[in-house]
Image: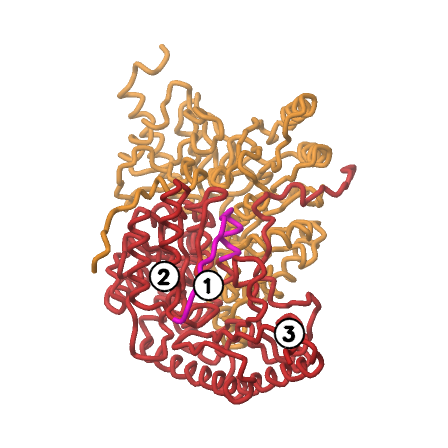
Chain colours: A orange, B red
Amino acid sequence: MSIPQSKPQHHELFAQRTKVQAGIAAFDFSGRTVDTSDVIALNYGLPDGEFFQIPELTEAATKALQVDAARVLQYGGGSGSKRILEYLAAQKTTSWNIATDPNDILMTSGSSQGIDLIARLFLNPGDEVWFEEPSYFGAIHIFALNGATERGFPMDEEGLLVDAVEQELKNRKATAQAMPKLFYVIPNFQNPTGLTMSFARRVKLAELAASYGFYIVEDDAYGELGFDEISIPSVKAIAPEHTLYLSTFSKTIAPGLRIGYIVAPRVIIQALQKVKAEGGTSGFVQEVLANFLESVDFSAHLKKVRTAYRLRRDAMVETLAAHFPKEVTWTNPSGGFFVWVTLPPYVDVAKLWEYAIEERVSFVGGAPFYVSEGSGAQQMRLSFSFYSPNVVHDGMVRLAKSLRNYLDDTPQVRPS
Amino acid sequence: MSIPQSKPQHHELFAQRTKVQAGIAAFDFSGRTVDTSDVIALNYGLPDGEFFQIPELTEAATKALQVDAARVLQYGGGSGSKRILEYLAAQKTTSWNIATDPNDILMTSGSSQGIDLIARLFLNPGDEVWFEEPSYFGAIHIFALNGATERGFPMDEEGLLVDAVEQELKNRKATAQAMPKLFYVIPNFQNPTGLTMSFARRVKLAELAASYGFYIVEDDAYGELGFDEISIPSVKAIAPEHTLYLSTFSKTIAPGLRIGYIVAPRVIIQALQKVKAEGGTSGFVQEVLANFLESVDFSAHLKKVRTAYRLRRDAMVETLAAHFPKEVTWTNPSGGFFVWVTLPPYVDVAKLWEYAIEERVSFVGGAPFYVSEGSGAQQMRLSFSFYSPNVVHDGMVRLAKSLRNYLDDTPQVRPS
């Protein structure tokens, strides 16, 4: 063949918006390859596969193919399969007090795709998306990929400091500057902090969205994984017209199904459907999910996993209290998968990571969770979801040891 | 609750790039709702569910969950599941003469997502994507959604008129204008025309890509559905460094799995992986597919469906020859799902559609397959894939009758 095989300059051809930092690659500070075989990995936000309901999913898959395979395996398109949309509408309406019609829902390939579709629908290059800080690095990455200008606002124990947001909105208005288009929040058991936004803050944020004309993107991936009976109304329930609500079955059933969904005003769902250009979320998997949800006692399942995850959280925070120096502080989440740890200012978390890997334990450092450059250097996210309480305990003991080793090796960093 | 429920001006907030025409909605000229229960639908490009291998898929799904559910149902990420990547690499290398390593492949949610990811990776607003015309409306829509400026080049019986492309490239170079970034083609059994690009044209296009520095996006959705033994080397085999190759299991196994893939130079695969922001294609479905492909005689299956689809094509073109006026012309595809019909210049295909629906048969008019405004008014795409030869025959007889009815009702349009 006579085609000259010159190597094109790939990177010169790539779009500008792809030149954002890939936050998601930041698990590993050093970039070196680590043999992970005996590492207790507290970095990934994984549900424990022990809770996957294998026999029930197998039966659901078999049934999907036996009852109506010619339809289930055909092109689907639209916003989703009818049965799953109806299940979700009923569930959101009754359990979550979010009045929802099947036409207000779009099925997505996990809630990551939901974030991506919202970004695609709303963002012109440079449009602003605001965040509570720290926030989920996947969302920060996806919005950036879609050309967003990003800005973070601080949090305290009650979640986002909404007063700081209001102040900035007022300034913007007074000086005729552009408003944000979207505000991305994770009100329940936030990733990475595990914090929950108070009811008063939610109401206030909703009021700001209504007054200043932006949308709240409410990511509720962990909403069904609260450890206590108390549950705060979602922002979507408070201000349905101003909120784009995202959730997923990845944490409660299994990530590998890749099924999430968006609940939003119908006009938005219709517009999102038009920008969802991948031919639809797998109809087969949607049918498996519908069969599964009809056949199992999902409330009982949720109760079981909540109890299990609560015990893992307990193991993590108890070991933090028992084995870490008093200058280390942490959040005590009432749900979800994560504890957020703040180390003393003299600890360099990237260096600590090297010591942790030596002790066969891993975590994610704070930096990728920040929009603001240079933040997160003393923080780390620890996930307690994947291992039994004993293993979580052992992992935390290893981490405490690696912190001691680090401090012993570098006494000069510690103030005398 | 005190939140003022003002309706935000959704459309004012939407991104500019979303304001493209949704070609995919153009199936129905009139916009009116049609009761489709007894319509022979020759519009959709659907594989026949009769060829879905239900027992084998059921077994594959059961096995996926029994052998290693905790892994299969977990977060996957990366470019795809190892087994399916290895299967594809081996298959492309041996059967298609495309030397492929698993690292040169990215699994996608159908090939539509493949198109979307390529568009996202390469296109800044206004960057040019070129097409053979007519072309697949889904691709035209997806590239437009990603901000492409689109331009079409004519075809003849040997496919794309590459000389016209070369002329334009020369003009661009001489006048220092911007080059296209991508050229999207469907060389085998094209959608919508059913035409196949000749070997000489493929080589020439590959040479142009190498000389002028653009990528060929080769959509090979129908490549395994050729009716004859002859098979022309893919553009990817001719110029691997300059071609991004797309395919899918939607036509050969089942669309509802939503599994397609991209074969491209490794540096491109790695970059595509970074812009694939939906958390990965379902690991569960990839495992089902791997089990399925290992357990069935896929070559025998392909042989069976090729034979079946060939008989359907025969039924369609024979009925065209027997029942349509001599001014009507059509392509005679050697594979795939589609016949492209050109009506006499005095027929308005949008009006014919109304007559067709009266006779309970449907088709897609030519317009959405063109980038160029105002083209396709005398053309229609007919799909023979979904029905048995008898039903295809009946549908074509109905279509012939609706053409007669239309011409009888509007004698003035016919030149005397």
Residue at horizontal 34 percent and vertical 28 percent from the top: A350
Q: Is B212 drawn above or below residue A170 in the view shown?
A: below
Residue A50 screen position, x and y as percent: 43, 55
Give, as a single range, the part of the protein colored magenta: B140-157
> Subunit of mark 1?
B
Closer to the N terminus: mark 1 or mark 3?
Answer: 1
Residue sitting nearer the eye, A92 or A168: A168
- Contact (CB < 8 A) between labels 2 and 1? no
Mark seen at residue B353: 3
Inspect the magenta stretch and tell me whether residue B249 lies in it: no
Dot 2: element:
helix
- Contact (CB < 8 A) between labels 1 and 3? no
User: Which marked residue is nearer to the observer: mark 3 or mark 2?
Assistant: 3
> Subunit of mark 2?
B
Residue B368 screen position, x and y as percent: 56, 62
Residue B403 screen position, x and y as percent: 63, 81
